[in-house]
Amino acid sequence: MYKFAISYYTMEGTERKPQSGIDIRLLRPGQSWSEGKQLIENTPHSGYYEISIESESDCGFYEIWDNIGNTQGQFSGKTCTIGKLDARGLQNNCIFGNHILDGAVGGTKIANEAIGTEHLQNGLLSLSKLQYELQDQDKGVGDISQCSPAKLTQDKFITHILNKEYQELPHIILTNQCDAFLYISDVMLVGNQVTVKIRISKVYTATDPIYKLLALAK
């Protein structure tokens, strides 16, 4: 449970005069006056108002409204954060690249699945920020020779087993860099392990396979 309190007073010279009987409410941005959470002046004529927040779901950013000058309530210009900061407390464009690079906002600060691709601007993430895995011919095993790298003159298939665990099949991209026709013939997910099979279809002048295999997690 959290408590929030605020004092309302005016100054007469050096003397502080409490403002009693004011209707003060906490509003989420976009809420109406009637939806606000009302603070209570527990001690009469004290000008000291407080509220208890019982649920974690009610924690976060609030605007402080009162009925001074408007009986229907108006924004006082003050804000507060009770408990953990929520998305309502983050203004547009308030997080910059340097906040992420210097570790101020790390993976432990972001809940699982809280950020999806629809939340990101085009071009915001570089490859270094994506979850990916890169292998080359040295990780592939030939089906007949059982060699790594595979033998173009002996093998028909090259098998790659990805090192990372995956909940679903990743995007697989094969970049061939030798004079032979290679293509992905099959991708399998068994448990959390992904196996990729590359077909050696035609060998021209290449003596050894040279390629990159890129797996991008969805």
Image (spheres, rainbow, N blue to C red):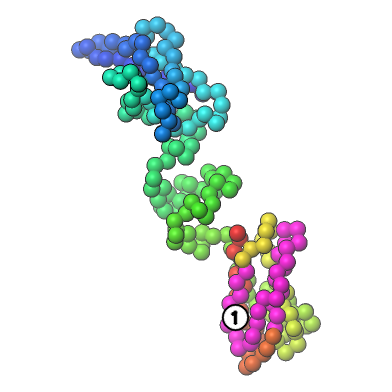
Q: Residue at x 52, y 23 (%)?
A: 53
| Foreground pick, 88 / 160 | 88
**Residue 207 can be seen, yes or no:** no
Q: Is residue 196 above or below residue 37?
A: below
Q: Is residue 65 above or below residue 188?
A: above
Q: Is residue 29 above or below residue 68?
A: below
Give the quadrant of residue 183. bottom right
Give the quadrant of residue 121. bottom left
Residue 183, magenta (yes or no): yes
Residue extending farthest top: 44
Q: Is residue 210 left or right of residue 76?
A: right
Estimate the x, y position of residue 70 in percent, counting from the top left.
30, 20
Q: Quadrant of the N terminus?
A: top right
| Foreground pick, 145 / 69 | 69
What's the magenta bit mostly, secondary-structure-wise?
A: strand
Estimate the x, y position of residue 32 in percent, counting from the top left.
41, 28
Give the quadrant of residue 151. bottom right
Estimate the x, y position of residue 114 in percent, counting from the top left.
55, 46
Residue at numbered disc 1: 176
Magenta highlight range: 172-200
| Foreground pick, 155 / 90 | 90
| Foreground pick, 34 / 18 | 34
Estimate the x, y position of residue 6 in percent, counting from the top left.
39, 19
Residue 214, magenta (yes or no): no
Q: Residue at x 47, y 19 (%)?
A: 51
Q: Residue at x 73, y 63 (%)?
A: 189
